[in-house]
Image (cartoon, coloured by chain):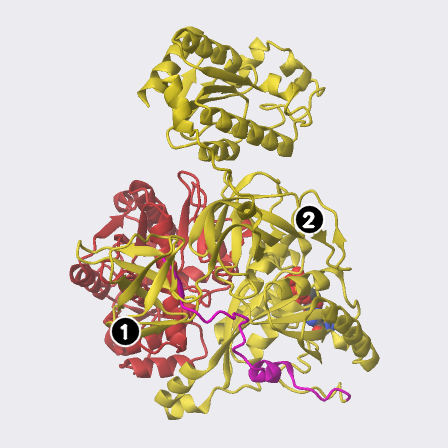
Amino acid sequence: MDKVYEIDTLIAKDINAYLESHQNKLLLRFITCGSVDDGKSTLIGRLLYDSKMIFEDQLAQLKVDSKKMGTQGNKIDFALLVDGLAAEREQGITIDVSYRFFSTKKRKFIVVDTPGHEQYTRNMVTGASTADLAVILIDARKGMLTQTCRHSYLCHLLGIQNFVLVVNKMDLVDYNQEVFDSIVYNYYEFAKRIGIQNLTSIPISGLKGDNITIRSDSTPWYNGLTLIDHLESIKLGQTGDKTQNFCMPVQWVNRPNSDFRGFSGKITAGSIKIGEEVVILPSKKTSHVERIVTFDGDLNMASNGQSVTITLKDEIDCSRGQIISSSNSPPKVADQFNTTLIWMDEKKLIPGRAYYMKIGVQTVMATIAEPKYEINVNTLEHMAADSLKLNSIGVAILTTDVSIPFTPYAENKTLGGFILIDKFTNSTVGAGLINFALRRTQNIHWQNVNITRDDHAILKKQKPAVIWLTGISGSGKSTIANAVEKKLNRMNRHTFLLDGDNIRHGLNKDLGFTEVDRIENIRRVGEVAKLMTDAGLIVITAFISPFESERQIVRKMMSPGEFIEVFINTPLHIAEKRDVKGLYSKARLGQLKNFTGIDSPYEPPEKPEINIDTTSMSIDEAAEKIIKKLFSF
Amino acid sequence: MKQAQTHLARLESESIEIMREVISETDNPVMLYSVGKDSAVMLHLAKKAFYPSLPPFPLLHVDTTWKFKDMYKLRDKVAKVTKMELIVHQNPKAKEKGINPFDHGVLHTDIWKTEGLKQALDKYRFDAAFGGARRDEEKSRAKERVFSFRTAQHLWEPRVQRPELWSLYNARKAKGESMRIFPLSNWTELDIWQYIYVENIEIVPLYFAAPRPTVIRNGMLIMVDDDRFPLEMGEKPVIRSIRFRTLGCYPLTGAIESKASTLIEIIQEMLLTTTSERQGRIIDKDQGVSMEAKKQQGYF
Ligand SMILES: Nc1nc2c(ncn2[C@@H]2O[C@H](COP(=O)(O)OP(=O)(O)OP(=O)(O)O)[C@@H](O)[C@H]2O)c(=O)[nH]1
Ligand SMILES: [Mg+2]
């Protein structure tokens, strides 16, 4: 029964006609998912083999490999066609997604093989994000498992519309209809609860080839389509994207010379014609389309999916990350969202910490509140959670540092899906979907005051500023901060010193030293310092403030030029030798947990305004240097 | 490519989107230009992505001094016509030691290509390099991300690749680390040929069948492109009608006997063939996962 798909006779007869038909074949992107060892890779290998996508040299290699691995005796191990990494072949599992291509007379396919192992769920998510259809495999002997539920849930969450339930390894249960029926029954129950609508189920054997490309004699009780017939005939084109209004995120400003200024991007919704009115978001400036430029000549009209360069009639400000949209009902702009998050990093989510958020082609900073709940993928229960760990799915409020244009993910994926990037390691640590925007911040209006911050500053005859000292314990922050304040005081400046230990006795006495509490500690200090600069003061702070991302949040709170970061640069071994408070020895003995430099990291500033090397500078010199710099701003 | 909805138009648009992301999110990108058909397509796409500007990066050819003469000819012509900067890098150590495909086997590729590439990237401090690899070429390539992260030592760690959702590419990296970018990831060999055909892209004439001097080595049909090729006593190259499905160093690249001398004939032949395009490459032949091992060490 091998190779039922013969090479298209049209190729030899009329190649032009063949190519024409090939161009017009619809492309279906699908993924296989399910639990470990349910037979996903084997099934894909089988599909490739049966659709004649395997060349002779590859087949020869496959036979050699199969023998070497010895999993199938002398028979072919189809999984080896897709499990391409050495580590995968050794362990007989899939670790990362694999993208394979094949086509039949009717359609082209990109099939994404995903790992079943829970540890590698993020790779499965990678594959699911671009798929139109999910093939969910279940081992007939095992039935539904946690990973079956997790994968189904994730596929549905990411917006996949079509599902095929494939009950695999039917050969191992004697092609028993009852086994099939009961698995199908259970899965339908689950599918209904998560909202899957288009679902078909097929009994197969990936290994033996039953009901994959040809109908099996072993399952006379099954009268549905074979898998490939189903994949070839299922209706396509429902992407789930509902927005019809023109939208194009600007990727790049195209300026070959001073006469041309075009905005290059890929259209993510709707279409546009020359002369139509557009609005730039978030600035809300409007203009009209002058030209739609491409290498192959100007266009009168362009639509969803095309990469073009647009010029506008007016000279208006527009740069990378902004959005050109049709002026009737453009995407909304907001800075706080209800989001569903999929956490993908070994280090768990830290509420309150700033992450980079990439959405569309824009990168902004985002902080995430403690999750409202985590979702149990088996029972779909909402569980209380104070964070999300690797592979957890939860719902949380996310706040961005600037307002961004968006559409809910359910309406359009490009402006509703985002990734989160760790600012320190640069890894992609999470993915998220915008459910809706919140209006909380908008509802609390700023109370207008008559005496402005400038009035306060003028009265004090000074320019307000925050001198932010950061460094490990015992580096000399408090001592130097004190010296700076004394000098400024003598110069008749109005100052205030916020010191870590003092604040922790009052305002922040509810906070401990976990990562989350440290972040909140710094956030509060930042807000207090901000209020003090509004009052016209020069604020000096002395906090360890070990994380770059929090220091950057504080920097962003202040007016430009008012934040002066001072790195009190003392090597650990020297601070430890000084050990003024005896804390290092305690930490070394394990009596103090989460101690910076010992069992909690210190991230040195990337670009501090001032660097103080305490090993080569006296306290007085350090204070002088800081004050000199302060007055130079 | 004017029709909005053909398969090739969609692939083209996706590749353009990728290229525009790269120049916006990296500091110093470069395009690896190997003169083959995939490079030709990639370069063509770059022209489209940035038009009317020139592609805002140079081309880099990591040369081994053993490419086909026709490849050098086209390379220099392309550099002139596109007006893009062309950097040619030849590993000075390989040159000094006279590394060659006849005496040094695998080392030849390691030293000229892998080492040479790393040297060039370090020398010019490129933090992103476009490559024309496709996922359909080989099973470890099928596993690679579009934005493929490399450590400061240029290592690829296939087990800890970054998740890559939708078309949201994470190009962030620390100093010294870099990205390899594969804008042709989702193209197949057939897509490449069809695109060359519709877009009328110039490719090296060696892809078309013509009578050429050949000998047989290790079961492969090798073209004798110059007199550095060590012939056996009394051996005379035989003129055969041959062409190449992939191009590399001439002593290591197997030809196929063919009469296909037009693009459409090539496409037809390719669709009817029973062997893969990589079959003609000696470098891919050593043991199962050799490509993965090579990639881990920094080979493209
Ligand atoms: N008898 C029988 N065995 C099968 C069938 N399909 C797969 N297997 C075997 O099940 C084992 C696991 O198959 P894989 O294809 O590697 O499973 P997978 O789902 O890709 O596993 P992961 O990718 O690691 O999650 C292999 O030994 C296969 O040969 C089938 O239909 N019948
Ligand atoms: Mg697998």
- Residue at 75% x, 76% y is A170
Q: Residue B176: x percent and y percent? A: 40, 39
Q: Residue at x 31, y 83 (%)?
A: B264
How many other residues sit within 10 Å of disc 1, few (<14), some (14-19) or many (≥20)? some
Mainly helix, strand or loop, the magenta region?
A: loop
Give the drawing colour for chain B: red
What number is the disc on residue A299?
A: 1
Disc 1 element = loop
Quadrant of the image for the C terminus of chain A?
top left
Q: Chain of mark 1?
A: A
Give the residue number, with chain letter if any, for mark 2: A372
Q: If the picture is divided into quarters, which one holds ligand 1?
A: bottom right
Name the one closer to the observer, A164 or B96: A164
Q: Residues within 10 Å of mark 2 (few under 14, many from 20)?
A: some
Secondary structure beneath dot 2 equals loop
Find the magenta span and give its range: A221-250
* Whether residue A507 is visible: yes
Q: Is residue B219 visible?
A: no
